Amino acid sequence: MANTSEKSLQGFMRKKQQATQEAHAQRAEQEVERLRAELNQVSGGSIVRQTYKKIARSLTSRTGRSRRFMCLVAEESGGIVGTVTLTSATPEALLPAPFPTSKPQRMYLSSLAVADTHRRQGIASALLKSCESLGKRWQQDTLWLHVDCSNPAAQSLYARALYDTIGQDPFWFGPFRRLLLRKMLLQPPSKISGKTSAARSIGGSKRLSDGVFVWDKRE
């Protein structure tokens, strides 16, 4: 049973990685075609093939450096019992890649899975904490993920980990609708609210004769 689950996880991760690489290559190819069209317009339709190749190499190198991807695994006795993927994506986009979007890149968690024989042992929570630590190391202030609306167990896991619900897939997703969740990794200090609450805790009143504020003297 454990071997079957491990093989299923490995096969799923291979397919996931292949799909990610194909989507990345398709986006790079589309960008190259756009740049090629612009150069054609500037040069009046004549473009040197070597220049096109340089553009392709430059674009691939640039997008490769800016892309973050990490696959974390939980092991026991040399076997994989859990896995999760951490990468940069646009979870707020209405349509998935390679459709264009103006939404910003976010640190995105996906493909969290634990073998059936090792569930309810804290493995999923440990993988989540590792992703959050990586996000902070990469100087990200938020971590995003999707969870199926029909998966209350996973929703409870993320709620315990303090993930907030930000949105939901449109109705036309049908039975495959998902919730969009987010967790703040770097909380901004609430200096203003702290000063306000401190000031309100100090009593006093204006003196009627000259309008000067007089503090209460409390022992």
Image (cartoon, rainbow, N blue to C red):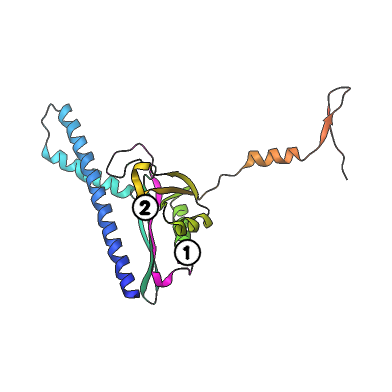
60 left or right of 199?
A: left
Residue 140 visible in image: no
What residue type is disc 1 on?
A: Ala
Residue 126 x, y percent position in the rendering: 47, 64
Q: Quadrant of residue 194?
A: top right
For the C terminus, the image quarter is top right
188 over 120 or under it: above or below: above
What residue type is disc 2 on?
A: Thr
Viewer-proximal residue, 73 or 189?
Answer: 73
**In this figure, which residue is indicated by the disc labeled 1?**
126
Picture residue at 26% right of the left edge, 54% below the top: 19
Q: Which range is magenta? A: 98-126
**In this figure, which residue is indicated by the disc labeled 2?**
87
198 over 124 or under it: above or below: above
Q: Which of the numbered marks, if any, corresponds to residue 24?
A: none
Task: Determine if the magenta segment contains residue 66.
Answer: no
Give the crowd class for mark 2: few <14, some 14-19, many >=20 residues within 10 Å: some
Task: Determine if the magenta segment contains residue 116.
Answer: yes
Viewer-proximal residue, 200 or 56?
Answer: 200
Under circle 2, the secondary element is strand
Residue 42 x, y percent position in the rendering: 17, 27
Picture residue at 42% right of the left edge, 44% below the top: 168
